[in-house]
């Protein structure tokens, strides 16, 4: 039987060689962190004020909204400012700025627990209190994700170990180095959802990770490791569900409509740390890589650490042509390096001027390559025209709202059409129109 996969997609160069085999290293304690209060759902209100002393793990932001996740101090020290800051996701958020006292004092917690001693309600409560969100980039609050609407349920949990985005290897290293924690986290997802079967999907170019996880689950009858074809965007939720379960998420639907819960490797590891050590989400592993860096690394760093600090740690030695939060396919270009690591920051990519040189956009030649590449089955060339000419009704009928903004269409386009920005604009407008009609 061949490797499981989905229809469409592309095969960009993996470019993971410089960090794929590099064990995770811990960054020095930052002198300052900038912690945005909007890191998943509704923005939090600050629970501290300028001049307050805080400890690691102390809750510094909270919201009464259901679709929101609290934020915690990632270093101990003094609150020096509460001010709007630019974030790497392109948004502006009120943030708590903390200057380190150099002591790294942790807030006294109740300590760890045992998964066996926890009820599903206990796990769900811990997920929220620990501030867990989707750590692959979207940062959707995890306690909401594991709370299906009435009439819906999960029968399968999938751990997304595909990590199909070029250059990024942080999930790969967690699968290799924190295997037991990942398995524990998956068991917790199964317990909290009541799902009967767990899957860990890993692209077949990550052989060390596949071997490590397989060895850890040999006695687990309800957990299956699924090697997947190396193809982008294999790690997209809908494509992962199609590849592993053979199910299709309906247009406009969510994974729960296919009975599946998909969780990121980093989020799963964070859950295991919350269970066993009582730790809220205050740090994460980030891949910092690119040709202008002397020492590209997978770095365990505190939330709120500035990109510039991590670039210095990796010995930036060359001109930056483009700085990207995330990877080259779905990442967001940055105009400055003094932005903070968020809960959803999986990578920091530095491209040289030669690698980042812009290519001229030309007229569409109607070759159809974008149609073949689209993993959702859309017709990007038509949607591009609809969106550029503000033909919103036609864009709606063409299902622009189902676009996952993966960039596969733009990657294969010989005319270098700026397809993703056009479709993103159209998607935003169509969804805004839907909200206005409600």
Image: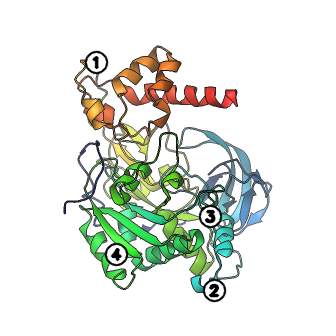
1 and 3 marks in contact (CB < 8 Å): no
Cα distance between the residues tagged 1 and 2: 60 Å
Q: Which mark is residue 364?
A: 1
Under tag 3, what secondary structure? loop
Give how far apart the Cα atoms at labels 3 and 2 are: 28 Å
Question: What separation in Å lies between label 1 and label 3 (alpha carbons)?
Answer: 48 Å
Q: Secondary structure at mark 1?
A: loop
For label 1, the crowd category at 10 Å Cα-Cα, with few meaning under 14, some 14 to 19 and many 20 or more, is some
Marks 4 and 1, Cα distance to the nearest angstrom?
Answer: 45 Å
Q: CA distance from mark 3 to mark 4?
A: 30 Å
Question: In the image, 50: left or right of 6?
Answer: right
294 left or right of 187 in image: left
N-terminal label among 1 and 2 = 2
SS at circle 4: helix
266 or 314, which is in the foreground? Answer: 266
Q: Which residue is mark 3?
A: 74
Q: From the viewer's perspective, is the residue at label 3 or at label 4 nearer?
A: 4
Q: Of residues 388 and 258, which is closer to you in this image?
A: 258
Mark 4, residue position: 213
Disc 2 residue crowd, few under 14, some 14–19, many 20+, Cα 10 Å: few
Depth check, mark 1 against mark 3: the one in front is 1
Q: Nearer the viewer, mark 3 or mark 2?
A: 2
Do the residues bearing badges 4 and 1 touch, measured as CB atoms within 8 Å?
no
Which percent across, then down, holds residue 99? Answer: 66, 59
Q: Position of residue 402 (x, y in %)?
A: 47, 37
The residue closer to the viewer here, 436 or 100, is 436
The circle on residue 117 is 2
User: What is the spatial separation of the Cα atoms under label 2 and label 4, in whole angstroms?
Assistant: 25 Å
Evaluate if marks 1 and 2 touch, with contact meaning CB atoms under 8 Å apart. no
């Amino acid at each position: 039987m061949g490797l499981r996969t989905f229809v469409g997609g592309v095969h960009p160069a993996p470019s993971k060689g410089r960090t794929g085999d590099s064990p995770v290293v811990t960054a020095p304690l930052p002198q300052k962190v900038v912690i945005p209060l909007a890191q998943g759902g509704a923005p939090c209100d600050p629970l501290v004020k300028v001049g307050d002393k805080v400890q690691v793990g102390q809750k510094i932001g909270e919201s009464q909204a259901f679709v929101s996740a609290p934020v915690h101090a990632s270093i101990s020290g003094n609150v020096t400012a509460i001010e709007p800051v630019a974030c790497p996701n392109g948004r502006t958020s009120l943030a708590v700025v903390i200057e380190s006292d150099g002591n790294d004092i942790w807030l006294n917690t109740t300590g760890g627990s045992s998964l066996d001693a926890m009820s599903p309600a206990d796990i769900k409560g811990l997920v929220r209190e620990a501030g867990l969100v989707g750590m692959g980039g979207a940062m959707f609050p995890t306690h909401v994700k594991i709370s299906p609407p009435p009439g819906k349920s999960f029968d399968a949990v999938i751990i997304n170990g595909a990590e199909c985005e070029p250059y990024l290897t942080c999930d790969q290293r967690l699968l290799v180095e924190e295997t037991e924690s990942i398995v524990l986290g998956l068991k917790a997802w199964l317990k909290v959802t009541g799902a009967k079967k767990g899957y860990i999907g890993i692209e077949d170019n990550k052989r060390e990770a596949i071997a490590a996880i397989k060895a850890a689950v040999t006695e687990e009858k309800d957990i299956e490791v699924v090697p997947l074809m190396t193809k982008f965007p294999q790690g997209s939720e809908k494509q992962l569900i199609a590849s592993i379960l053979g199910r299709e998420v309906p247009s406009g639907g969510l994974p729960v409509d296919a009975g599946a819960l998909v969780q990121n490797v980093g989020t799963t590891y964070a859950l295991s740390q919350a269970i066993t050590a009582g730790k809220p989400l205050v740090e994460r592993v980030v891949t910092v890589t690119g040709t202008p860096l002397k020492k590209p690394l997978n770095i365990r760093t505190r939330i709120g650490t500035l990109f510039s600090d991590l670039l210095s740690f990796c010995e930036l030695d060359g001109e930056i042509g483009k700085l990207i939060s995330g990877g080259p396919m779905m990442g967001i270009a940055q105009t400055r390096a003094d932005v903070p690591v968020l809960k959803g920051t999986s990578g920091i990519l530095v491209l040289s001027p030669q690698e980042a040189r812009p290519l001229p956009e030309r007229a569409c030649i109607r070759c159809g390559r974008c149609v073949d590449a689209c993993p959702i089955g859309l017709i990007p060339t038509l949607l591009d025209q609809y969106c550029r000419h503000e033909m919103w009704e036609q864009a709606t009928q063409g299902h622009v709202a189902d676009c996952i903004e993966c960039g596969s269409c733009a990657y294969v386009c010989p005319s270098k059409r700026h397809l993703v920005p056009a479709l993103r604009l159209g998607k935003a407008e169509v969804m805004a129109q839907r909200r206005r009609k409600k």
